[in-house]
Amino acid sequence: MTKPISLVHGREYLAIPGPSVMPDAVLQAMHRPSPNIYDGELIEMMPALTSDLKRVARTDHNVAIYISNGHGAWEAALSNVIAPGERVLAPASGMFTHGWAEMAEGIGAKVDLIDFGMSAPWDMDRIAEALRADKDHEIRAVLAVHVDTSTSIRNDIPALRALLDDLNHPALLMADCIASLGCDQFEMDNWGVDVMVTACQKGLMTPAGVGFVFFNDKAQAKRAEMPRVSQYWDWQPRTNPDLFYQYFNGTAPTHHLYGLRAALDLIHAEGIEQVWSRHERLASAIWAACETWAEGGSLHLNVAERIHRSNAVTALRLKDGQGTRLRQFTESRLGLTLGIGLGMEDWDACFRLGHMGHVNGHMIMAMLGGVETAMAALNIPRGSGALEAAAAALAG
Ligand SMILES: Cc1ncc(COP(=O)(O)O)c(C=O)c1O
């Protein structure tokens, strides 16, 4: 028998669903001394930075920036529009809605959670039922996770907007685009989203540590009625501030801003619609491979229908222990790190492919080649021709 030879020495590839691969331009932009935070370039770059962020979110409204991760953005958004004792509706198709709902409970909200499990998108009829039952319009907001990174389900935000409108329900539509922004199409204004939260470490290709809350006039009107909002989470001074420090309620995340500037330059040089198309095409190659492997009976895509799958992440299931073993093989033998089966009961049967942000055709083919190699090494039965199917999807 031949001795296994380590094949990890070379450029490592982190293919988890966030933090995502950082472009060299982002890393290089951050490699510099601290700037003056009272005068000069950093201050001058803010107006263009905020307007370029809004172009990614497809909104003409407001953005507040926080030194935080996605959890911080969740809490920031809730803190500005939900007072203790108010109700929110949370339709869940993955663990991140549960997380946001728990955070809402933490600030004193009453949460009506509808759980669609870990493989199904929203069922609009059940959401309609909950909204119809709310005759006095006590539900102040719907917490809508666009792409749930744990399940890789992409929910239909325009359909939810249409439902709220049809029922004449005034609840705010609050979207979590932490996984989807800059990967899956999202149109804040056209889709009638009132509040959107995101963070910088996925489609925005910047090191983790900055969160964003976008909000429109309707959300601002609700903010104005709030009995109190904590000074740090208050989005008001952060949006069009009189003084630079108010953008961040203190010292700016200096280097993150340089990195973000470089990332936004890349996104807008490519064009946001082209960024979506790239992710769509790359995802179609991944699914072509996965659907072929699935013919062998061992591998299952967590989301059955393509229409409900995100272009940013794909959740997969093998049998007990095999998801973990496959990841361990790709990481220790090939230098390829895949995502864990986050939030799944049988989590070590599962794994996820991250395909968000700075990824291109050859990276996706390499990732799929890594999975094929691991399946071969672990003798996992699989349909043949997966890489050919992926190549055909990219070649078309
Ligand atoms: C959809 C979604 N929401 C919220 C979060 C929480 O973000 P963070 O881990 O940055 O706090 C994540 C993180 O992966 C996410 O994918």
Image (cartoon, grey):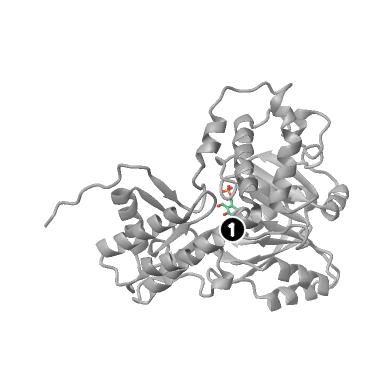
- The picture quadrant where one finds residue 102 is bottom right
- Secondary element at tag 1: helix
- The picture quadrant where one finds residue 124 is bottom right
Coordinates of residue 173 in the picture (x, y in percent): 76, 61
Mark 1: C-beta under 8 Å from nearest atom of ligand 1: yes
In the foreground, 186 or 207 = 186
Coordinates of residue 316 in the picture (x, y in percent): 44, 66
Q: Is residue 230 left or right of residue 147?
A: right
Name the residue beneath numbered marker 1.
Answer: 96
In the foreground, 300 or 181 = 181
Mark 1 crowdedness (10 Å alpha carbons): few <14, some 14-19, many ≥20: many
Q: Is residue 103 left or right of residue 364?
A: right
**In the image, what residue occupies the spot 61% across and 56% down?**
274
**In the image, what residue occupies the spot 57% across and 41% down?**
206
Q: Is residue 83 left or right of residue 73?
A: right
**In the image, what residue occupies the spot 52% across and 35% down?**
27
